[in-house]
């Protein structure tokens, strides 16, 4: 999970460094944010499922 987040941050940083259009940088940022939210939701719900299945 951490690798995907840092990879997304690196991709966004590279897009900013290359002076890509604002749309590309914002799109990369939103994709990264969506990935973080989905991965966190998956992590939390799978953790809850493990503790509830006795």
Image (tube, helix red, strand yellow):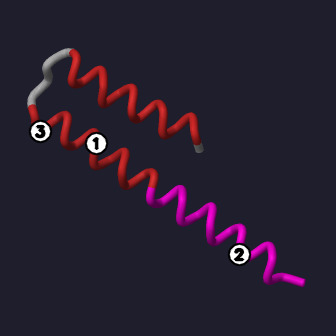
Say which element carries label 2. helix
| On-image quarter of the N terminus | top right
Q: Disc 3 or 2, which lies upstream in sequence? A: 3
Where in the figure is residue 53, as x and y percent of width and height? 83, 82
Q: Which residue is mark 1?
A: 29
Q: Which mark is residue 48?
A: 2
Where in the figure is residue 47, as x and y percent of width and height? 72, 68
Q: For the residues marked 1 and 2, what is the alpha-carbon distance in whole angstroms?
A: 29 Å
Q: Nearer the viewer, mark 3 or mark 2?
A: 2
Q: Residue at x 27, y 39 (%)?
A: 28
- Magenta segment range? 37-54
Say which element carries label 1. helix
Q: Which mark is residue 8?
A: none
**For residue 39: magenta?**
yes
| On-image quarter of the C terminus | bottom right
On screen, residue 17 versus residue 20, left or right, reads right
Q: Disc 1 or 3, which lies upstream in sequence? A: 3
Q: For the residues marked 1 and 3, what is the alpha-carbon distance in whole angstroms?
A: 10 Å
Where in the figure is residue 33, as x and y percent of width and height? 36, 51
On screen, residue 45 versus residue 14, left or right, reads right
Residue 4, above or below 49: above
Q: Which mark is residue 23?
A: 3
Mark 1 closeness class: few <14, some 14–19, many ≥20 residues within 10 Å: some
Say which element carries label 3. helix
Furthest residue in direction top, as rendered: 18
Q: For the residues marked 3 and 2, what is the alpha-carbon distance in whole angstroms?
A: 37 Å
Q: Disc 1 or 2, which lies upstream in sequence? A: 1
Q: Residue at x 73, y 76 (%)?
A: 49
Q: Quadrant of residue 27?
A: top left
Q: Residue at x 11, y 38 (%)?
A: 23
């Amino acid at each position: 999970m951490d690798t995907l987040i840092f990879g997304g941050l690196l991709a966004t940083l590279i897009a900013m460094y290359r002076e890509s259009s604002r749309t590309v940088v914002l799109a990369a940022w939103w994709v990264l944010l969506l990935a973080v939210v989905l991965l966190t939701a998956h992590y939390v719900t799978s953790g809850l499922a493990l503790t509830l299945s006795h």
